[in-house]
Amino acid sequence: MKVMIVVTHLLGTGHLARALTLASGFKAAGHTVTVASGGMPASQLDQGHVPILQLPPVRSDGVNFTDLLDDAGAPVSDALRASRIKHLLDHIASEPPDILITELFPFGRRILRNEFEALLQAAHSMPDRPLISASIRDILAPPSKPAKATLADALIEQYYDAVLVHSDCDVSPLELSWPVSDTLAGKLHYTGFVAPPAPQRHPNATGTDEVIVSAGGGDVGAHIFAAAIQAASFDQNCRWRILVGGSDAKPRIKDLAIGAPSNVIIEAARPDFRQMLHHATASISMCGYNTALDILQTGCPAVFIPFDAGNEVEQGLRADALGKLPGIQVLRSAEMTPDRLLAVLSDVTTEPRRTPRQDGFDGAVRTVEITARLRENMV
């Protein structure tokens, strides 16, 4: 079967990473898959030899998701929006998919509603229309107004055959963060968590005895990096490694290096990050979906500082759930100081190291099975 996954990441790269993991699952099962990516290119991610249809990229202005910027930092023009729609429609016309998956929409990315609806309308007009599914993570940003949930319900009812929820219903049901109507409930399919295969230990043991500080693939995390560098200056017996993501990583690395102590390594986010966690003393990070699963799969002691700018609550809900496990502590941004960070770090590193979890991460395989079965039932 032919599969098309459409995703636009606006701040971090978690949405794209999860879409690529799903795509790799389809590819491993023998299907032909393309990921249409509308966010900024993210070279640090493992594409798994999955073809990417790169749309003219857009990004958010920090945590302001109502005004989009192009790759030059200028407001997105009508011409660029039209070009994105043309790319999508040209692809679906030349390579009609059997399965079409929209990542996050219609539960988010409403600012891109025109291009998603143009694609959905084109899909419905095909003689042999594809199975259409929405793909969402474990916890969504709760709707700030009832109208947002109402709109999502209407779009699901009009266009979608299924909603794939990438979590365990017993661990984090969608109701934790989103109102589930009767209409929506009838289309939900829980896949389990979507993670790539558990990372092997690093062949060079890179990361051994280090505190690894990361903030995802976006242009955020400055407050975490600043506190970590100060904390490292009081912890000269340990090596700290700061991994900086985002399109402007180089100048940010240069700025962070000014006055940093000698026991701190500052470099760009790297593709072997997951392998390094096996060897690290601890991880300090935000609590995005993919990072949380990395911590569970490696057993690395962790301090989570959930992203909470712009009234974001998703990562806080996830961090609170994981903070009940041994070797994991949650530190809110408002409470973070270098001294407090060191104290919490000491707590997680003195507890017995957790055994890496192996079960419950086959969401990509389950997604392939669920969508293939639903597609067969349509024919």
Image (tube, grey):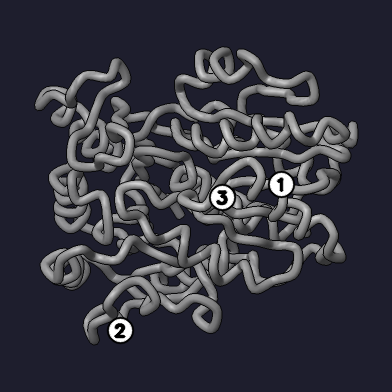
- Residue 26 shows up from this direction: no
Disc 3 residue type? Thr
Disc 2 residue type? Gly
**Callout 1: helix, strand or loop?**
helix
Q: Is residue 256 left or right of residue 107?
A: right
| Residue in the image at 62% along x and 24% along y | 268
Q: Which residue does the numbered mark 3 point to in the structure image? A: 21
- Looking at this view, is 367 or 357 the one in front? 357
Quadrant position of residue 304: bottom right
Crowd around label 2: few <14 · some 14–19 · many ≥20 (10 Å):
few
Q: Are marks 1 and 2 in contact (CB under 8 Å)?
A: no
Quick one: label 1 or label 2, which is nearer the N terminus?
A: 2
**Callout 3: helix, strand or loop?**
helix
Q: Is residue 320 above or below residue 268?
A: below
Quadrant position of residue 106: bottom left
- Residue 247 shows up from this direction: yes
Give the image location of residue 25, x and y in percent. Answer: 58, 54
Q: Which residue does the numbered mark 2 point to in the structure image? A: 186
Quick one: label 3 or label 1, which is nearer the N terminus?
A: 3
Quick one: label 2 or label 3, which is nearer the N terminus?
A: 3
- Looking at this view, is 294 or 39 the one in front? 294
| Residue in the image at 76% along x and 59% along y | 347
Give the image location of residue 296, x and y in percent. Answer: 70, 61
Q: Is residue 379 left or right of residue 298?
A: left
Which label belongs to residue 342? 1
